Image (cartoon, rainbow, N blue to C red):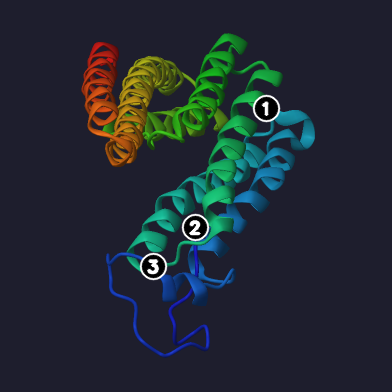
């Protein structure tokens, strides 16, 4: 997610504006080594550490499971802060844009798969959540040429529910707490499916709007080309100009009617 303030990067020394837009100068002065990127790297490094702690001594030692939970909790907390810091202090870099979502998916995927391997979490839950995350990621690429699907409030709530539920499964819980974690996970699964369907709806709408806008733009370019041809023909003679003008009007109307029908 990131870059450093100009003064830290050896630039002009101008201070970044909190919450301000990222300018060209800020991008040029951005550095890989800033607090937001470091938090993302820490989260990536915590993934193998978390897995090793979880599976230590067969994966059923309550003490080592508690250590694994601590690593998981730190990773989830850094996820809350690195994006906020990057946006608030203009610390956005290409590395952060790529590494942050990878780190998010990696820690959650590692937790779900590991818990299923240990037999603590049903594989169907892991499959549903991972399929949704992978599907939405691919769908974002599908529509990125037309628009960016924004993160929704439901999506953020889904992430919170998933993190809470997975963290409860990492701990060795019994009795009412074990029952509670099951229902928290069910809430996370429902939110995962519902928000996933909403993202699909948004993607379809955005793609249709993008295609319609492209057709309108193409129609306008075609109309402009016809007008240019009409002017050229008018220079050649009044009769040719009138014919080209009529063709221009018909072509423009037909193209716009087609674009409106697509909408």
Q: Alpha carbon of mark 2 to alpha carbon of mark 1: how far?
A: 27 Å
**Front-most of residues 242 and 172:** 242
Give above or below for 141 relative to 178.
Answer: below
Under circle 1, the secondary element is helix
Across and down, in percent, residue 82 comes to 45, 57
The residue under label 1 is 114
Query: Which sits earlier in the primary sequence, circle 2 or circle 3?
Result: 2
Give above or below for 192 relative to 30.
Answer: above
The residue under label 3 is 90
Mark 3 surroundings: few (<14), some (14-19) or many (≥20) residues within 10 A: many
Q: In which quarter of the image is the C terminus?
A: top left
**Front-most of residues 239 and 47:** 239
The residue under label 2 is 1
Disc number lying in front (1 or 3): 3
Residue at (32, 27) in percent of width and height: 219
Give above or below for 214 relative to 3.
Answer: above
Mark 1 surroundings: few (<14), some (14-19) or many (≥20) residues within 10 A: many
Under circle 2, the secondary element is loop
């Amino acid at each position: 997610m990131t870059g450093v303030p100009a003064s830290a990067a050896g630039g002009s020394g101008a201070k970044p504006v909190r919450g301000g837009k990222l300018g060209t100068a800020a991008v040029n002065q951005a550095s890989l080594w800033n607090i937001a990127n470091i938090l993302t790297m820490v989260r990536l490094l915590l993934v193998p550490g978390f897995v090793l702690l979880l599976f230590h001594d067969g994966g059923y030692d309550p003490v080592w499971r508690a250590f694994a939970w601590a690593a998981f909790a730190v990773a989830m907390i850094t996820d809350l802060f690195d994006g906020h810091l990057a946006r608030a202090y203009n610390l956005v870099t290409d590395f952060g844009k790529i590494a942050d979502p990878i780190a998010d998916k990696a820690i959650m995927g590692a937790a779900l798969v590991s818990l299923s391997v240990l037999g603590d979490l049903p594989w169907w839950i892991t499959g549903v959540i991972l399929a949704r995350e992978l599907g939405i990621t691919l769908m974002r690429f599908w529509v990125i040429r037309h628009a960016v699907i924004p993160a929704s409030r439901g999506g953020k709530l889904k992430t919170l529910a998933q993190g809470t539920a997975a963290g409860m499964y990492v701990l060795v819980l019994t009795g009412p707490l074990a029952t509670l974690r099951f229902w928290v996970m069910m809430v996370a699964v429902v939110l995962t499916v519902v928000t996933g369907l909403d993202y699909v709806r948004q993607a379809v709408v955005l793609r249709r709007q993008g295609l319609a806008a492209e057709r309108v733009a193409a129609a306008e370019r075609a109309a402009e080309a016809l007008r240019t041809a009409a002017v050229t023909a008018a220079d050649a003679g009044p009769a040719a100009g009138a014919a080209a003008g009529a063709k221009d009007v018909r072509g423009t109307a037909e193209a716009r009617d087609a674009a409106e029908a697509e909408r």
